[in-house]
Each structure stands twice: as C-alpha cells, then as structure tokens.
Amino acid sequence: MQLNVDENTLKGMVREAILATFTPEVRNDLVSKAVRDLLDEKPDGSNGRRDKSRLQLIFDSEVESFAYKAIREMFESDQTVKASVESLVKKAWQKVLSDEEGIADSMAKALTRVLCGRAY
C-alpha cells in the first residue's frame, strides 16, 4: 500500500505532532519568544546590533517589492513617464561626465580599495 500526501499537508501534520508534545506553558513561552524575536531590534545572544526588527525588515522588503512592481508597470504602460525618466537619466549622465577629473579621482580611489582588499 502506498500513501501519497502533499507537502503542505505533511508539514501541517508534522507541525501539529510537534506542538502536541509541548505543554501549554512551553507552547506559550515558545510563541512569546518568537514574537519578541520578530519585534526586537537586538536579538538575544547577538554580538551585533540590528537597527530594525525582523518584522520591520520584512515590511520594508514588501514595500520595496510593491514599489518596484508599481514603477515597472508605469514604465511599461505610460510612454510619457518612460520618456521623462530617460531624459532625466541622460541629463544626470551628462553632469557626471562633465566632471572628468572628479570621476577619475573617484575611480582611482575605488580601484585602490579593491586592489588592496578593502571593499569600502
């Protein structure tokens, strides 16, 4: 006899089996710690510092993803927006190129950092 169970059902069964082994107190403690970890800027036992909570990082990522999709749709559907942005990019590029000495200095510094093994 062969039993086929889809992945989501199997995950749910495993999750329920694991949770069933915990006492209500342990379960409450586990949930409290998980929520605290989502909201804390600095997790327990961390040597570093996180400026934003995991929840804020997730939210920021979703907002960025939404904005990217919305802007992409504007570019694809509205040729006026696309032309305006292209014009601004050309003007900005011309300004960059007009300062050849400054660009050369910046490139030299960047190359030196890379060659010396310092990314920044």
Image: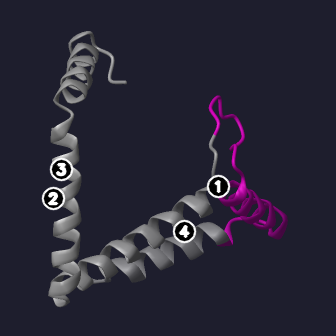
Whole-Å distance between the Cαs marked 2 and 3?
Answer: 5 Å
- Circle 1 residues within 10 Å: few <14, some 14–19, many ≥20: some
Number of the front mark, 4 or 3? 3
Nearest to the eye among marks 1 and 3: give it.
3
Q: CA distance from mark 2 to mark 4?
A: 33 Å
Which label sits on residue 69? Answer: none
Q: Which mark is residue 90?
A: 2
Q: Earlier in the sequence, mark 2 or mark 4?
A: 4
Q: CA distance from mark 1 to mark 4?
A: 10 Å
C-alpha gap between disc 1 and disc 3: 37 Å
Pointer 2 and pointer 1: residues touching (CB < 8 Å)? no
- Image location of residue 29, percent across then percent down: 80, 60
| Residue in front for this viewpoint, 17 or 69 | 69
Along the line of sight, which residue is nearer the eye, 34 or 19? 34
Residue beneath the point at 20% across and 60% down: 89
15 vs 115, left or right, is: right
Residue 59: numbered disc:
4
Label whose residue precedes the other's in the sequence (2 or 1): 1
Q: Amino acid at mark 3?
A: Trp
Mark before the other along the chain sequence, 4 or 3 = 4
Q: Is residue 114 visible?
A: yes
The residue mark sitting in front, 2 or 1, is 2
Residue type, label 4: Phe
Q: Quadrant of the N terminus?
A: bottom left
Can residue 2 be seen here? The reply is: no
| Secondary structure beneath label 1 | loop
Instruction: Please tell me whether residue 97 is drawn above or below residue 63 in the rendered image.
Output: above
Magenta-tinted stretch: 20-49
> Which of the two residues, 11 or 107, is positioned nearer the viewer here?
107
- Residue that protrudes farthest toward the right in the picture: 25
